[in-house]
Image (cartoon, grey):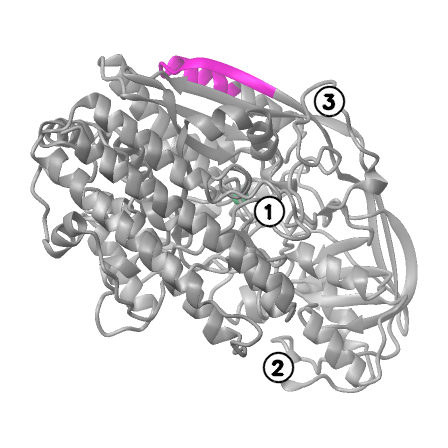
Amino acid sequence: MPRPLPTLVASFVFFLILPFALSAQLKQDAPPESSIFGFSPAHAATEHQLETAFQSIPSPEKAREWHRTFTAEPHPAASERNNQLADFVADSWRKQGWEDVTLRRYDVLHSRPRSVLLEMTAPVQFTASLREDAYDVDPDTKNPAVSGAYFGYSASGDVTAELVYAHSGNPEDYDLLRKNGISVKGKIVLVRYSNPYSYRGFKALTAEREGAAALLIYSDPAEDGPTRGKVFPDGPWGPESHIQRGAITYDYIVPGDPTTPGWASVPGAKHIAPEEARSLPKIPAMPLSWRDAKPLLENMNGPEAPKDWQGALPITYRFTGAVKVHAKIDMDTSMQPYTVVEARIRGGELPDEWVLLGNHRDAWAFGGVDPSSGTASMMELTRSLGELKQRGIRPRRTVVVCSWDGEEYALTGSTEWGEQFADDLKKKLVGYLNVDESVAGAATTAGSEGLSFSPSAVASLAPMLVQASKEVRGPSGKSLYEAWRATAMRDTKASAPPLDSALVETRIGSGSDHTVFLNHLGRPVINLGFTGDYGVYHSMYDDHYWMEHIGDPSFEYHIALTRIWGVVALRLANADLLPFDFGFNAAALGRFLRELEQKNKFDSRHLALKRLHGRIAEFEKAGSALREAASHDLLSATASPQKIQRLNEQLLQVESNWLDPAGIPGRPWFQHLLYSSRYTYAHLEFPGLTEAVEKQDWKLAGEQAVVLERAVEKNTRLLKSAKSSWEKNK
Ligand SMILES: [Zn+2]
């Protein structure tokens, strides 16, 4: 589903007090063999050998073959093809040597179109094609199984009304319309996708709240078309008929099957009535290409819209006037089975600690980038880890892999699976490594530095991710770390590469399968992927031809992603001491809090955050002190396995302590106190506190600050007691 904001590397430099062991290592170019975070010197040497063996297995040609298989046919959730692919994944994993291969079935309220119609009835008659053009060079574009334009979970409806253009469809756009004396009540609203970006489900809720009768969202050429560069099939951007499908679910309130909020849709589960579901839109809506939107826009004759509302079509964009539209949408909302495929390689020493890998399988059409680039990278990863296992190399911890279903609809498969196994996951899950789109950009237009590596991670895992990137071969032959620094510098137009401490994006929004693990279960997550020019998202042109001719013709980026994914997984699976860095984590929290204060200037009589700052500073000190003590003993090999294990249990508890079972105000499913997402899918730190401050609800903000203080204090106490018991048992 997700097309959150392109991840921008923080363009400013910030200063951190890194824990001793870490900061010493970050200064060195090539860490010595013994210096993998969390590994004793002896185990680090073995790990290096293992990683070298692992990295030589993934093959670009195999990745290309996987990619062709997964993109051969459209495979949306609940389609026959997507279910066949579930069996194919299961069979492949069995052949690759994975264990306990299981298909998990969920019965879900699904959404697919029976019929969709859009016509202009005045001032002239026009019927929208709602279809994309075929191209001879790419026979896949002639596949009759490709759908027309529709949105998952649109309401059904039959509406004829006047058309109003509302720019991006964000609340401030409706405010401007109001100022110009224009109401959208009972009207059909036409908005563009991203200027600035907001999730289409946020646009739908906003239109619904404004009382609009229906919503049309179109792709303006300014955003993902010829204004940006060459269009398909000659380049990565969208041609005139491309349609960005998608869901408009209100999954920022609660994701997953809308009729089982908070519990799993296992066969026989209780379902609420669709009318009671908070995540189901009540407004009919559909996406449009700009070819279909242009006649509507150019026939308007009302007041001219302001300059920043003008798009790149050769017309004057107006608020209203003369255009009447008939929209008819009939959706089938029957229950359908979704299938999550699950497999594992049982850990040789710590089978009850899990490292989870995942990627969604379902696509709006062929899924060239989203998600089948990630699927191809994953299948090479499982093949490579399977081969190591056949050679007798088993990870210390259990590695679990999942092929999710229905991500595009409401993050559904991962959410249901996470809810089903919540108790186990809260106890056992060390971390979740998500890959949605592994290559969401065109290497052919990326310039000499190549595509940007754009991961995001909870702050506690950011330092280990940077360290792992140094060991991974990038597509250019340089290390991934070097390539990452070069593209980060280019993308931020900086004159020097960012500090290691600023490389990883530690703000995490929603819009992919990490959501349940982070926001509902309080487990640490990492998202991995490359990004660049990409304008065919969720259209039928997001296919194998796009990837093979424009995106990643050599498939080298696919396997670079396989390598970093595998190295991070192996480090989490094999580490003596789990490589969480809470000193770094605390520094990031301090920065988030300062950003909140800078963005929302408020009087300290309304809200004082001094005490929270103080608590975070104490947490930082405790985190750094513990890491220093533990790293020292680990490097000098003086800590017993029992002692390390006890500390690992405490480290895992820190992440769990960020959960508030009451949830954030108004959204009880979202329980993480540090991380959530906005309704637009944008990242949102300290969600309860931030939303209260933005509403200027000072009483609630004060309460939320206290909740945070208590959580930070609890974790500081935990780290301090972990350190003293560590030192006692020397
Ligand atoms: Zn996706």
- Secondary structure beneath label 3: loop
Does the beta carbon at disc 1 come under 8 Å from ligand 1? no
Q: Quadrant of the C terminus?
A: top left
In this view of the protein, can residue 478 be seen by the observer?
no
Asked whether 89 falls inside the magenta stretch, the response is yes
Label 1 – label 3 distance at C-alpha: 35 Å
Above or below, 464 against 588 in this view is: above
Front label number (2 vs 1)? 2
Across and down, in percent, residue 82 comes to 60, 28
Q: Classify mark 2: residues with Cα within 10 Å, few (<14), some (14-19) or many (20+).
A: few
- In the rendered structure, the answer to whether residue 101 lies left or right of residue 617 reads right
Q: Indicate the amino acid at tag 2.
A: Asp
Tell me the number on the disc at residue 56.
Answer: none
Question: Magenta stretch?
Answer: 88-104
* Among the two numbered marks 2 and 3 on one chain, the one whose residue lies closer to the N terminus: 3
Instruction: Return the disc, 1 or 3, that comes first in the chain's sequence.
Output: 3
Residue 141: say if magenta: no
Is residue 37 shown left or right of residue 417?
Answer: left
Q: Is residue 361 above or below residue 88?
A: below
Seen from the viewer's position, the closer of residues 490 and 373 is: 490
Task: Please rate how many residues cluster around mark 3, counting C-alpha atoms within 10 Å: few if below 14, some from 14 to 19, many from 20.
Answer: few
Instruction: Look at the numbered discs 1 and 3 and tell me whether their residues touch, using CB distance below 8 Å.
Output: no
Q: Which mark is residue 308?
A: 2
Q: Could you say which disc has been placed on residue 540 in the image?
A: 1
Image quarter of residue 84: top right
Which residue position holds label 3? 269
Give the side of residue 371 with respect to residue 38, left or right: right
